[in-house]
Image (cartoon, rainbow, N blue to C red):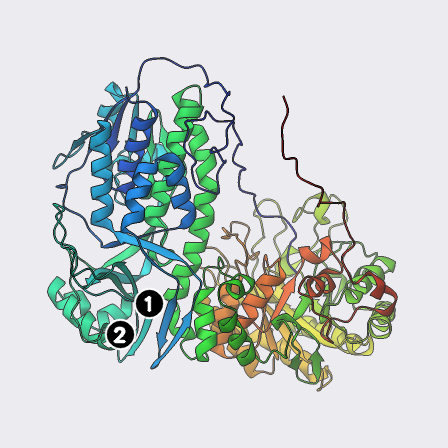
Amino acid sequence: MASLTPPPAAPTPPAAPAPPAAPAPSAAGPDRSTAPATEARPARDARPLRIAVIGGGPGGLYAAVLLKRLDPAREITVWERNAPDDTFGFGVVLSDETLGGIEHADPTVHRSLQREFVRWDDIDIGHRGQTLTSGGHGFAALGRRRLLEILHERCESLGVRLRFRTPAPPAAELAADHDLVIAADGVHSATREAHADVFEPHVTTHRCRYIWLAADFAFDSFRFEIAETEHGVMQLHGYPFSRPSPDHPSTRPFGPRYPFGASTVIVEMREEVWRAAGFDTCDEQQSTERCAKVFAEVLGGRPLRGNSSTWTAFRTVVNERWSHGNIVLLGDAAHTAHFSIGSGTKLAVEDALALAACVEEQPDLPAALAAYETERRPVVESTQRAAAASLRWFEELAVHTDQPPRQFAFNLLTRSRRVTHDNLRLRDAAFTDAVERDFGCPPDTPPMFTPFRLRGLTLRNRVVVSPMDMYVAEDGMPGDFHLVHLGARALGGAGLVMTEMVCVSPEGRITPGCTGLYTSEQAAAWRRVTDFVHHRAPGTAIGVQLGHSGRKGSTRVMWEGIDQPLATGNWPVSAASPLPYRPGVNQVPHALDRTGLDEIRQQFTAAARRAARSGFDLLELHCAHGYLLSGFLSPLTNMRQDAYGGSLENRLRFPLEVFDAVRGVWPEDRPMTVRISATDWADGGTTAQDAVAVARAFAAHGADAIDVSTGQVVADERPEYGRSYQTPYADRIRNEAHVPVIAVGAISSWDDVNSILLAGRADLCALARPHLYDPNWTLHAAADQNYTGDGAPWPLPYRAGSRKPPTGRTDAPKPRLTLG
């Protein structure tokens, strides 16, 4: 049973007023482009600021441009240790929203960029000899060297001092005689490391190696190419940054324009593949030659070239704080996001826009730096979550290569969760229609309303009301609340409605408010619920989740203190090992002996027999969230020295014994599923590979699907919350263990459900909080998509309400004149 404790919310950026000269930062921040012309600038010291910028990359240079343009009297110096024509990497991709901010802030730079951009709409995905194209994406790129040249020229025209080939003095030294020090010194920031005790950086090194290269011709599109070699899977990310221009040789100091155009080419692969292929012993020339050979077909046999290119592993940088006194981090020094979503330069430029605006708006620098971080942090964190999802997808690329071609392409395109089914339909309806046809969608039927069969049960759609503890039972007895709660959600259109965790014994309850199936009276009460669902919501299936609380039992109901022990009336708890959930807070459980194991197995089978008599269509065995059976599976909670502890095979032994016993008494034509925690979100816990092995084991014993959740196994977990944040674990299990899966975890929109299904990440989607907010969530999802088929029929008494009610008038004439 998933706890309904909400994840922490991101801070909301302040919508502060702005002076007319302030630039607009990213579209995600406050809109400063429409500030009233009469608004006064906050009072501040009239002395012009003296500003030092460490690092001459795009972010540092653009910050200097904006701050100088806003006040020409400012003394601004940029230190760059390299020469002006030194640059690493090749092309830079910027989004339309970033360009919009640049246009408002500095039209001169914007015009220069517009003249240089290469634009394209298509993404080509090459895999196993087939290329699939999706259009309508809209990209703009230019050479990094040309971008720097434009910014150098703009700095010089404004009077910004550029000190090339000159390492900056330490930030602390600069801070002593400057009003503001901007540390834009990159992913390996010396400033960040020198003041690590204040910034508190967290740097995570990832599992793929990659190298930046270039090809001297222009791709027609953004290109992903997959190569399955004898050593493992390798991938190419490529995009054009210069179009052919043979009749217009360049006179710029940074060298000739590419006569045949040019493209950035990034080659990436898992560390173990990189080593097996021998790239770890190659120099730059050998690496470029070998990469060109691997991807000879997409390159047309043409060579690749480097530019001091080396293989590296991507590092995600997160800082607890972005400023220290008058020193502030910007761009990669403050944060990084994986190149597969093209965000590094974009984020740095948007940082510069926001920082300049906040310096202009706020009454003093401390307030400006605080406002800058408050505004930018939520935007950056959202981008980093998307980048992390994209990065991990490519790390696990080999899991997806056996998918059907269009599903593979759709999965790749939607990997970061920023592009969704509905969004992709707007971009390229023909491509999306083809993916839906391959999936098996009948005409005019969204993916979520296609049926799905589990053993003898056919679900009319792919939506599951996730198990949710209600904590309102008395002595384990379901009552009127449960009838209304589950009945309402059954009437709301979901294909499958699940009960909360129903406990197999009084001692197996989490709280005194938990339901049970350990008496015949409870079974009769549940029969009342299932009869209502089957008679009043025909076509909706209802499932029961059986479980035992283990060491997390004998606690208060959620709103009185989740996982806190009862003030009085505690009952003894048992578990795989005598480890309390929270030492010093929860009781030390009794470690189950042979007699105890046999007794609990019998409790599960007795409850399963009652569940069958109660009329449930599906039974789920709860082996997740740190409850009793989950406690055997995790190496963090199972310290046994007998046949039930140690190796994963041994830790699986008792949960499989219980599963077999339950399957033996559960009707043959009715499906069984198993909920697991696919990660403990804690060091030393269950790994993703362990989860695949656990899923395979249950499937081999007859599980019809795996309900893939995560966490809640140990109290000191550190989940990575975010939209659909648990889905990658379901994706991996489905495509590696080849077993049907149910995805859960912060899935909140019908667009996400359609995306997850079409991408082959899951077969069913379970939603909890959305069904608390709206019991008719599934019916409303059908109405929003103009779907009226058999996958989501409205109950006859409700049919008159199947259209969204009209709201107040919104078509009143707009005023044409404003008279003062």
Quadrant where the C terminus sits is top right
The residue that mark 1 highlights is 223
Q: Nearer the viewer, residue 647 or 411?
A: 411
Is residue 89 visible to the viewer in this orientation of the structure? yes
Q: Residue at x 68, y 44 (%)?
A: 561
Residue 623 occupies quadrant: bottom right
Mark 2 crowd level (few <14, some 14–19, many ≥20, 10 Å Cα) = some
The residue that mark 2 highlights is 298
Is residue 477 visible to the viewer in this orientation of the structure? no
Residue 136 occupies quadrant: bottom left
Quadrant where the N terminus sits is bottom right
Asked whether disc 2 touches disc 1, contact meaning CB atoms under 8 Å apart, the reply is yes
Compared to 375, does 99 lie above or below? below
Give the amino acid type for the residue marked by disc 1 in the picture.
Arg
Q: CA distance from mark 2 to mark 1?
A: 9 Å
Q: Nearer the viewer, residue 299 or 383?
A: 299
